Amino acid sequence: MKVRIGVGSLPLASGPGPGPELAELIEQLEAHGVDSLWLADTASAPTIDPIVGMAFAAGRTRSLKLGTGVLVLPGRNPALVAAQLASLAALAPRRILPAFGVRSVASAERDLFPAPDGARAALFDESLAVVRRLLTEDRVTHHGRFFHLDDASVAPLPPQPLDLWLGGRAPAGLQRIGRLADGWLGSVVTPAEAEDARSQIQQAAAEAGREIEEDHYGTNITVIPPGTTDAAAAAALARVARRRPDIDPALLVPHGWAATRDHVRRFVAVGLTKFVVRPAVPVVSWRGFLDQFTAELTGLETELST
């Protein structure tokens, strides 16, 4: 199995830096040989829309993989999502990595992705089914609870089916991944929790008569970079604690690169092979962070791959 470590959205201390600054980040990722860039779906934050950002990056690179981390699917038209992904796959063959989520992690954005009361999970399931069919079938007729399509299509179809990954850690979400998805991208989980999640997904897949590839399990890792002030580190841990009040945030957020390498090794030991690393605090410069990332983590991919 090949271990791959990508980079998540990098907030700058001086601001998000859309435009020329984003171009510099993308070019540096390619130059550093980084596996992938994952763009968050945070519509209300001063960041680049993931679909727009992926298209921009696809046109400026030749090897960098591009993922969504994660794209909220309920509230979007799945036919349009499928058309966007098909276009991206045509522009950057074998480099598009879509990962979807049921809802935004930011409570302020919940209203941006509307769903009927009590039906968000059902809406997600049907949306994902529509996206998959449109990306793999020449013509699609679908009459479901939420969507109706007659002889619909998107073009060009990807020459090779896109793997559709899902986020989430709740039991219902893990069951859904086993039933419907091609991989799992976790978040704010410990290695022990990731091992349990992987087991639940595999069991759900087996019960559905499916199989998820062994190397299609991964997680986001938020890192406190060296040189972060104590106040900034404490604030970052407090943000994580609000998402996971049931666990010590220090178990979820490694402090420094040595701790990050150990963290990755523990995840690999329980079967995860794909990682998205992002700083827990705004960085002074993208170039500085990428220099550290490359020096500290790139060799780890080779060390841990079998």
Image (tube, rainbow, N blue to C red):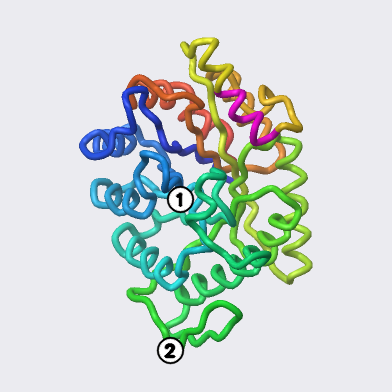
**How many labels sit on residues?**
2
Taking the image as shown, residue 189 lies to the left or right of residue 40, namely right
For numbered disc 2, what is the local secondary structure?
A: strand
Q: Is residue 241 magenta?
A: yes
- The magenta stretch spans which residues? 236-244
Residue lying at the far left of the rendered structure: 20
- Residue at 52% over, 79% down: 147
Horizontally, residue 142 falls left or right of residue 212, namely left
Could you tell whether 303 is left or right of 95 in the image? right
Residue 103, image x and y in percent? 57, 53
> Which of the two labelled residues, at mark 1 and mark 2, occupies the earlier sequence position?
1
Q: Nearer the viewer, residue 255 or 14?
A: 14
Please name the amino acid that badge 2 sits on: Asp
> Quarter-wise, where is residue 179 in the image?
bottom right
Height in image: 33 above or below 262?
A: below
Q: Which residue is mark 1?
A: 68
Splitting the image into 4 quarters, where does residue 221 fall?
top right
Quadrant where the C terminus sits is top right
Q: Main secondary structure of the magenta part?
A: helix
Work out how far the residue at label 1 is from the one at label 2, CA to CA, in angstroms.
28 Å
Q: Which residue is mark 2?
A: 151
Does residue 29 belong to the magenta stretch? no
Q: Position of residue 269 (x, y in %)?
A: 70, 36
